[in-house]
Image: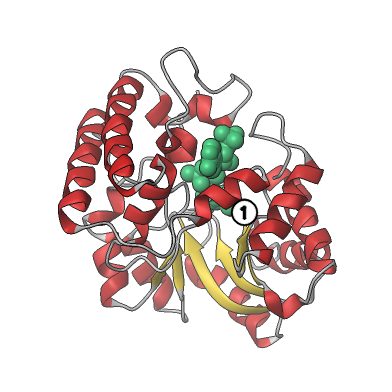
Amino acid sequence: MGGEAWHDVRDEESERALHAALDAGINWLDTAEVYGRGHSERIIGRVLAARRREEVIVATKVVGAHLAADQLPGALDQSLRNLRTDYVDLYQVHWPNAQIPIEETMAALLAAQEAGKIRYIGVSNFNARQIAEALQYGPVVSLQPPYSLFWRYIEKETLPFCREHNIGVIPYSPLAQGLLTGKFSLSNRPPADDNRAHNRIFLDPTYEVALQQVEVVRQVAARYGKTPAQVAIRWVLQQPGITAAIVGARNERQVAENLGADGWTLAPEDMATLTAAGDKVMASLGLEEDTPMWKWD
Ligand SMILES: NC(=O)c1ccc[n+]([C@@H]2O[C@H](COP(=O)([O-])OP(=O)(O)OC[C@H]3O[C@@H](n4cnc5c(N)ncnc54)[C@H](OP(=O)(O)O)[C@@H]3O)[C@@H](O)[C@H]2O)c1
């Protein structure tokens, strides 16, 4: 909803999608100062202004370039202005920054918490070692990692670490940025001005493997009378240690479909079939845990 990075996003459509989600009982919105350089936060600010503030758990993120003690307070104040609120429920460090000691960032976050500007501190794109380091300096309640059937690097160390330390895990890109909806094909790829043109799952040769495995998701979905998107989100939600999923949507229709991931259960044998399909995509990717999902070159 930042108006950049995703092809042809329209603000009015974004706002309608957000209201539709809240009307349907979604109680939590995730954004970041970096999305459209504040644009996404400002869209959410407009939506919040039309509703009761307490209705929504607002989560935003501070960008890696603003993690120093003399940068973070100003970044947070700008986010608060964008969001038209005087507090953020969950303020997350967007990506680790090896140039700034996490002790310094945590001190700035704790001061903001003390001042009542943020309720809880979270991190995103951190591995187990980085979370453990941050925990030395104060409470970190959540991790926002990339996680879907087709991107499962947290399973080895980070997810078990979070389970052990009672840290909420709120994955992003649970639909593999739309690939798991089944709408893409060899002849229908994301446009070049869309961030997905750089997503490693959308790059050859993995893309073809992923498209084949989407067919497995489609077969499982058909048995339940569900769509592939609903099954893909359901698979994420049923993983032990996952608190909730951050599902992107560009319009009301997508919101309505994605809500159909709630209120039912995938049987263990179907979970296993889906996981095996995801294994094939993971084998094709063959990456290290900390490799970003996007390849910019
Ligand atoms: N912390 C981080 O570093 C980080 C990184 C990425 C994302 N995030 C967060 O996570 C959220 C979700 O991740 P994401 O947007 O990357 O991936 P996602 O949730 O896996 O995919 C969302 C995209 O898939 C398409 N889609 C969704 N539902 C659909 C449906 N029912 N039918 C057809 N297409 C559908 C839409 O794009 P189209 O209509 O354009 O196809 C939508 O924008 C983001 O909005 C952001 O808040 C965080």
Q: Residue 97's spot in the image, x, y percent? A: 50, 54
Q: Residue at x 60, y 75 (%)?
A: 109
**Can I make out residue 292 in this image?**
no
Residue 157 vs residue 257, the one in the foreground = 257
Residue 76 position in % (x across, y down): 72, 66
Q: Is residue 265 left or right of residue 170?
A: left
- Residue 68 position, x and y percent, is 62, 62
Q: Check the image and report above or below for 109 versus 18.
A: below
Quadrant location of the N terminus in the rendered image: top right
Residue 252 in the figure: left or right of residue 190:
right
- Residue 52 drawn above or below residue 191: below
For the point 45% across and 70% down, which residue is it? 142
Q: Amino acid at mark 1?
A: Val
Q: Residue at x 47, y 46 (%)?
A: 173
Q: Residues within 10 Å of mark 1 (few under 14, many from 20)?
A: some
Q: Which residue is mark 1?
A: 63
